[in-house]
Image (tube, helix red, strand yellow):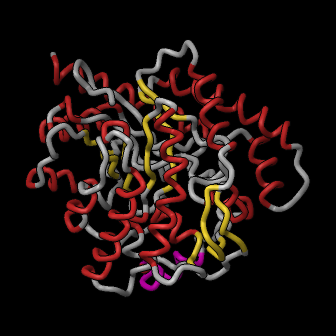
Amino acid sequence: MKRSTERILTTHTGSLPRPDDVVAMMRDRQSGQPVDDRALAARVKSAVEEVVRKQVQAGVDVVSDGEQGKPAFNTYVARRLAGFGGENREPRPRAEAEDFPGWASQGAQGPTQATMMRRGFCTGPLLYQDREPVEADVRNFKDALAGSPTVEAFIPSASLGTIHYTMANRYYPSDEAYLFALADAMREEYRAIANAGFILQIDAPDHAMDRHVTYGHNTLQEFRKAQTVRVEALNHALEGIPEEQIRYHVCWGNYEGPHTHDVPLRDIVDLILQVRAGAYSVEASNPRHAHEWQVWQDVKLPPGKILIPGVIDTTTNFVEHPEVVAQRIEQYAHLVGPENMIAGTDCGFGTSAGRDRVHPEVVWAKLGVLAEGARIASGRLWG
């Protein structure tokens, strides 16, 4: 994994807006409508080429495939693993909805996002049945990167805990059994990405967000116990992959809301650092968590590890001032050392296809400001 040895490197959290025609074809396929699979595959391939080019133009150093071929960062697993079925329509209210019912009533998903984020159940033994989609992800990304001046590249993949809350267990005798079965199945995908030479990013919003969703009425100790099992299962799945080839992303849910029930970073940071990873991507710039840089005054980043704090918000159309970005970067660089950090974003801009909270035009402006802020900070940090 590349380090910020001469300047602050920039990256983001993986998912980026898809073209409208890709969204339309994905929506039809998710809805069970007939879709020309060859046409969709060809358009996804060209979309990956486009999104890599735009990242480079924006000044991003460590780029992704934008998850252009996935309907959402989590529900895509339904097509790759055997053992899932049905549709889970049970609501998953956030704890803050009880305090702000008016706000909650306005937060319904649009029809496209609801289709892409359609949840199901685990109804049988899990098996990674189809490697072609992940192999297509790898091929498309390698082709798009050919001749590109990027510093490094990564592909995101869903964490076991994320799949656990997306596809509710109706087969395995316990949560632990389900998580370890997921570990054995998802190992196929994790290794396919790493063996292709890419950085593997594990997307784990469950590590923080699930405190105010699934465990909103449990104690902190009960939540931590559940997360401990998830970390153990994930580390089991990651065995054999070098730590320096793994990034671990944690956030409190990529939505604009009160977030008044978010678990403090200080209460979970020790569990985050137990994950076998070379870098940790943590939401850090939104108004509810911007103060938590202070955690790293007391919690020391383990030797050899990299911190990727979010210095750009991903839920609003505000375009940060480059000086704000530079100040955020310097704040972390002074705590962990500039060589031990990469500037990132709070979360993804396209966690599901058709998700448009931040307009695509604004997305690229934000990523451009990320790069500009990093240049300003680098000038002051290195002189």
Which residue shows up at 24% across the image and 27% down it?
Answer: 377
Residue 14: percent from left, percent from top: 50, 42
What is the magenta segment's predominant secondary structure? helix
Question: Does residue 257 lie above or below 328 as drawn?
Answer: below
Q: Quadrant of residue 201?
A: top left
Q: Nearer the viewer, residue 383 or 242?
A: 242
Residue 364: percent from left, percent from top: 53, 33
Residue 286: percent from left, percent from top: 35, 54
Residue 36: percent from left, percent from top: 89, 43
Looking at the image, the residue that sits furthest to the left is 298
Please state, as top left, top right, bottom left or bottom right, where the N terminus lies in the image: top left
Which residue shows up at 65% across the image and 66% down it?
Answer: 109
Confirm whether residue 354 shows in the render.
Answer: no
Q: Nearer the viewer, residue 326 or 252?
A: 252
Q: Quadrant of residue 267?
A: bottom left
Which residue shows up at 46% across the image and 37% down it?
Answer: 194
Which residue shows up at 37% across the image and 25% down it?
Answer: 372
| 344 on left or right of 191 | left
Looking at the image, the residue that sits furthest to the top is 147
Residue 101 falls inside the magenta stretch: yes
Which residue range is magenta in the image? Answer: 96-105
Confirm whether residue 69 shows in the render.
Answer: yes
Question: Does residue 81 lie above or below 278 as drawn?
Answer: below
| 223 on left or right of 204 | left
